[in-house]
Image (cartoon, rainbow, N blue to C red):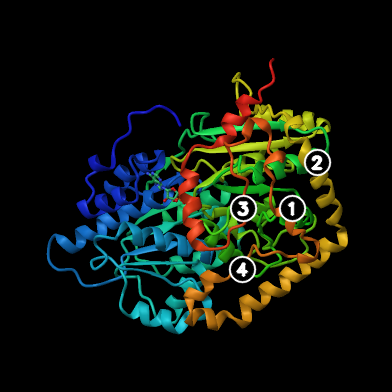
Amino acid sequence: MEDREALGFEHMGLDPRLLQAVTDLGWSRPTLIQEKAIPLALEGKDLLARARTGSGKTAAYALPMLQLLLCRKTTGPVAEQAVRGLVLVPTKELARQAQSMIQQLTAYCARDVRVANVSAAEDSASQRAVLMEKPDVVVGTPSRILSHLQQNHLKLSDSLELLVVDEADLLFSFGFEEALKSLLCHLPRIYQAFLMSATFNEDIEALKELVLHNPVTLKLQESQLPGPEQLQQFQVVCETEEDKFLLLYALLKLSLIRGKTLLFVNTLERSYRLRLFLEQFSIPTCVLNGELPLRSRCHIISQFNQGFYDCVIATDTEVLGPPAKGKQRGRGSKGNKASDPEAGVARGIDFHHVSAVLNFDLPSTPEAYIHRAGRTARANNPGIVLTFVLPTEQSHLGKIEELLSGEGEAPSLLPYHFQMEEIESFRYRCRDAMRSVTKQAIREARLKEIKEELLHSEKLKTYFEDNPRDLQLLRHDLPLHPAVVKPHLGNVPEYLVPAALRGLVQPHKKRRKQASCRKAKKAKKTQNPLHSFKHRGKKPK
Ligand code: AMP
């Protein structure tokens, strides 16, 4: 991040209850978007902000909104209870995320400011009851909000004071344009509005004309990725495809990569190949697969965020969503045949505290690299990106580096020197495991997971609604193909551990319980041994 004299939260004139919540969240200073947007919003300005997920944009609009609502409640004549804030988001998961953030920020004034999420289509009746109580802030997708407005469950024409349109570019690419326009007819003539979008295009320009009045535009000069003090980026040259598997196995098994890791591959088939490969060493992973029901995918992300899993395998399509330009709802990456309209919902979703992004397959475009790398080092947290590259892919990697290095800067992907000889002892096991993952095994595993997840998602939905605690016990990283798992491979005898690492690392052990999950979380905070091993193993130049 650039060096700047940040205006602290405490100097923004925010209510002490909000400041206390910010302190509890452990936020020591505002992010760039918060620093710029909050004072302007508090002055009553309309804002058009280019902000990506991970920039802290939710609090950038939520804090001034909550400040306004608290002012209404604490100064002047007692105001009638009414819906004064409306937040529009493109997906249910983002609605849940925004609601949760607002709730955390209102931890010390929850009685004064209530927030409701009305994005789930199936809960219309209960939402109606919630809306009757006129929560101060309503969060939802445009279509759900419009439906409630049309059924007179919600009335905004007299009360709305602040509108937020979040992830505006996604709202368009998800086909909410018409719903959004109809919805605007139900709003009063005057209100303050914030429009947040990761990209600016003609759709956003049109929307700006419709909802904003004399806005301040914030196109923050944020570089696409954080600087090297926050995000370390390495390229790892692997001589062969087998070396990639071998290195990954060693990095994970010897816990050289610690903390939550996102493993990126280029096709769904590769996701399952990797999952089955790692499964044989009792390294559990989940695949974020667009063919699985939305409920399952959201559950995987939410459990990953809570620390249930260390490793999630994903493709770009699943994490970045449909191409921003196309207005069709769907996606078409090779290997992904499902046509779930909400596939790719993960684009705006916040993967919490990802320590490492590992590009097992080289991203197909420089932009995809940026999006992948952007999953780590979010807000003010540190992160690391390792990109595996084969000798034949060097020129393609050059294009990525070109985009990253900007004008005249040094290349940003540092060489990651790893002495492959040190892990030669693992090669036999690696080959054996690679051989077991046949095309047939992958097909079966994929089918099995879809069947199981459908069962969890549909048949058990009602059960889990009544017994939410049991949902916590439902894991998505259990072995998919137990037939090919050889239990002895789960352990690493001391003699296989590279001499330089003996006594330093603890080979990864299978963990299933939440208690061990917590322990692991603690361990993650300790120093990452990857760095020490890397430097020990550094080849003389
Ligand atoms: P957002 O871009 O709103 O999705 O936020 C991304 C992540 O950054 C969330 O997990 C927030 O909790 C976190 N966050 C937001 N503001 C700050 C801050 N000032 N300092 C540290 N973390 C923050």
- Badge 2 local density, few (<14 within 10 Å), some, or many (20+)? some
Question: Which residue is disc 3 drawn over?
Answer: 509
Q: Which of the two labelled residues, at mark 2 and mark 3, occupies the earlier sequence position?
A: 2
| Spatial CA span between label 2 and label 4 | 35 Å
Q: Is residue 74 left or right of residue 443?
A: left
Viewer-side residue, 142 vs 436: 436
Q: Which of the two labelled residues, at mark 3 and mark 1, occupies the earlier sequence position?
A: 1
Q: Can you tell which of label 1 and label 4 is closer to the viewer?
A: 1
Q: Residue 51, position in %: x, y?
A: 48, 45
Q: Amino acid at mark 3?
A: Lys
Residue under the point 46% across and 38% down: 219
Question: Which residue is disc 1 drawn over?
Answer: 489
Is residue 280 among what the camera can see? no
Q: Can you tell which of label 2 and label 4 is closer to the viewer?
A: 2
- Badge 4 local density, few (<14 within 10 Å), some, or many (20+)? many
Q: Is residue 291 left or right of residue 377?
A: right
Q: Residue 148, position in %: x, y?
A: 44, 77
Question: Which residue is disc 2 drawn over?
Answer: 427
Quadrant into which the C terminus falls: top right
Residue under the point 66% across and 66% down: 341
